[in-house]
Image: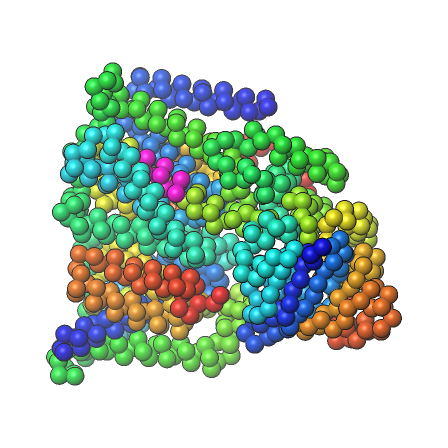
Amino acid sequence: MRKNHLGSVGALAFILIVGALGNFLSPYDTGLLTQMLIYGVFAMSLDVLHGYTGMPSLGHAAYFGLGAYVSAICSLKLGWPFGMAAPAGIVAAAVAAALFHLLALRTSKSYYLMITLAFSQVLWSVAVSWTELTGGDNGLPGVRRPNLGSWFPWTFASTHNYFYFVLAIFVVSALALYVFVKSPFGYALRGIRENEMRMRALGYNVWAYKYVASIVSASFAAVAGEMYMYLNSFVSPSSLSVTVSAQVLMMILVGAAGTLFGPVLGAGVFVILQYVLSTYTDRWLFVIGLIYVGIALYAPQGALVFIRDKFFAPKRGSAS
Amino acid sequence: MSFWIVNTLNGLSLAMILFLLAAGLTLIFGLMHIINMAHGSFYLLGGYIAITAIRMSGNFVVGAIIAVIAIAILGTLVQRLLLAKLYKQEMPQALLTLGLLFIIADIAFFTWGGDPQLVPQPALFQGAVRIFGVVYPLYRLFLIGWGLAVAFLLWMFLERTKIGAVVRAGMDDEEMVRGLGINMPLVFTGIFALGSALAGLGGVLGGPLLGMFPGADFEVVLLAFVVVTVGGLGSIRGAFLGSLLVGLVDNFGNVWFPQLSLFTIFVPMVVVLALKPTGLLGRT
Amino acid sequence: MTAPLAVKNLSRSFGGVHALNDVTMVLEPGERRAIIGTNGAGKTTLFNVVNGQIAPSSGTIKLFGQDVTSKALHRRAALGLARTFQITSLFRNLTVLDNMIIAVQALAPSHFVFWRRLSGYRDVIAKAEALLEKWRLADIRREEVRHLSYGTQRQLEIVMALACEPRLLLLDEPMAGLSAAETHLATDIILNLDRSITVLLIEHDLAAAFKIADRITAMDQGKIVAEGTPDEIRQEGNLKKIYASGGAARTTEAHQ
């Protein structure tokens, strides 16, 4: 019980500190902080699949980009207000995941990695070639920041106000995902990750759990994708690219798969790393590659877990 | 009629490039359970090294041999120094090769630049010939011939040699082979080097048609993934069948629906997986 | 009363090898039945087919009078079928308590709830705790399973199967790899099971099998070669015949 208490206090402190930071930082730095929160939601969404259920996806950008594109198209081409365009993007991603997983869940784990990649590449190629709808390589610029309507006292056009909008969505998403992974359903997902056959023998309909988990995961990825699109007022095919999929996977691997806070930390580390490195070198791909190789060889549980265990963990005693 | 002949031959020549890639991918997966994301990097490097070596030596064959040997050595090093440390850990192995994909892509970009480059065609196979009543580039026919020859040699190797038998047995039941006192780590390295060399050869032979450019590594590895998913992971015959299917569908798809390029190869994959989740010739 | 398990003319082949060949078997309610036989006799294949992990090539399977031949695993579990695995099959990176909670919750109405925390389902947790208490695993409930000794893991393997309150329990070599003392403990657990549970077990330790079972079925090369009470099986001298080719009876099967 007390440990639980500590967790809530920590989470509250985290939110307050991040919230306060948004007030003091320059618009540019606030933008970086906003990015961290957005990637945090994105990384948590993938972690539901990868960390909790053991479904390694290399195409999670598919839902991130799809949410962004559908929302942008609805508001630019159809003139929908934010209150309709935003849910439309989430629904589109959820439906895409629902259809895709009818197929993907028929195959084994090795195939899953490859066909998630193929799926996201197909969406990418559609975004590149369906120029009339997506603007092709140029993407879709000019989407206005969220406006909830005249009844709402604030607009989110300024970077600071938008930051607080994102913070609110982040908190709601994190809470929802927290309940999700702590629910009976979430426990079942861990069981599936650990031993799928046992779960089936115990009487779990493993297919249904994976199916729902993939839809939930896709929905939150779309939430992140839309927030990112509104942050930049722009969406382009690169939001669907394998680089984005590989980056979000890296955030989980840097943090700790199978926890919610780990990926958020990973997202923070990622944004800082990208910012720092981009001032010194243009060989970003090389760095990502090195990080992947390093994690695979030395810290498959997560780089931060590795550091914690190596330098801060009390020595484990009796356990054999 | 000539439309069908030309496009079928075009599809077949693409299929042969895909087969060179998919054969190595499927052998490596079947034996070691490694999903090698860096397989496309070996293709890309093979092509680039061939371009440089052919320029320097002025001879296609010399350049091709240098490129293939270089990639075989690279494959050996990757397997021995990196992947062997992660024996049987499927996910870390996939992540490691994904890292290599990025690293090699970056190195290639800084070495050979961002503009597409063609591997020079061998002088002997330049020009066109008349076949089935159409005038057709000789190089593409040469490519189809090479692909078939490699497929035949691989088949002979697996079915008719002792090492081939060990590889086939290892795909079915590794423990059993280990019990026979065979040096499996050596077989692993050998097969990884062979698979890498085939990918490098794919780059050399595909280079004159498809060209080498940043992102080509990822493009071909994705196609090779579709091939092995359709054909069935771990099956050479499946890789051959899948290559033919994907090569032809991609070619005709590009002719008829240029807007839907990648989408057209996704369709056969969806159909095959819906009917047979393990691929056409995959094990259940 | 209907038979908990009735299989009829069950066959399954793997690429020409008949792992199961025309197997017919009926269990009485409350019966303890042991299956013995050499490696590759088809015992685990029989379990996998009954359990639903693999489909039979031909034949039918009835659980409590219901034909389940083409039903999914989880539907069979819902009818009251539980099993353990020859290769310990636990959630290695979770605690003992979490393992039990997942097992208890499998057939609870809350199992698909994702909008409420599990800690709110006191009954599920209490039941998991009570089971650990009953089977003397409560002290280690916060330990992660991968840190436990092999014997304790085997014990948990059985207790987890019991968590779903099965009416038919399949035990695949519960004693394999255990020390003499641990074998004794495991035998005790099985002997103390409520008679409302019908038990079918595969056992290589003949002494333990004879002690537990009411009836024994001997299999060889996918076929049933003898069936009877422990005494009958002993007398018939069949034992020698069954094990003549297979060598040592007390070996663990690597795989089947």
Is residue B86 covered in magenta?
no
- Asked if one can make out residue B221 in the rendered structure from this viewpoint, the answer is no
**In the image, residue A122 lies at what x, y percent?**
27, 53
Vertical placement of residue B142 versus C186, above or below: below
Which secondary structure is most common in the magenta stretch? Answer: helix
Is residue A218 covered in magenta?
yes
**In the image, residue C71 lies at what x, y percent?**
54, 57
Looking at the picture, tell me which residue is in the foreground, B68 or C176: C176
Residue that appears at 77% across and 68% down = C227
- Asked if one can make out residue B257 in the rendered structure from this viewpoint, the answer is yes
Count of labels in the image? 0
**In the image, residue B206 lies at what x, y percent?**
25, 68
**In the image, residue C60 lies at what x, y percent?**
60, 65
Looking at the picture, tell me which residue is in the foreground, A102 or B7: A102
Question: Which residue occupies the extreme front position in the image?
Answer: C1
Where residue C220 sits, quadrant-wise, is: bottom right
Looking at the picture, tell me which residue is in the foreground, A148 or C145: A148
Residue that appears at 49% across and 65% down = B284
Which residues make up the magenta segment?
A: A215-226
Q: Quadrant of the N terminus of chain C?
A: bottom right
Residue that appears at 31% across and 17% down = A23
Q: Quadrant of the C terminus of chain C?
A: bottom right
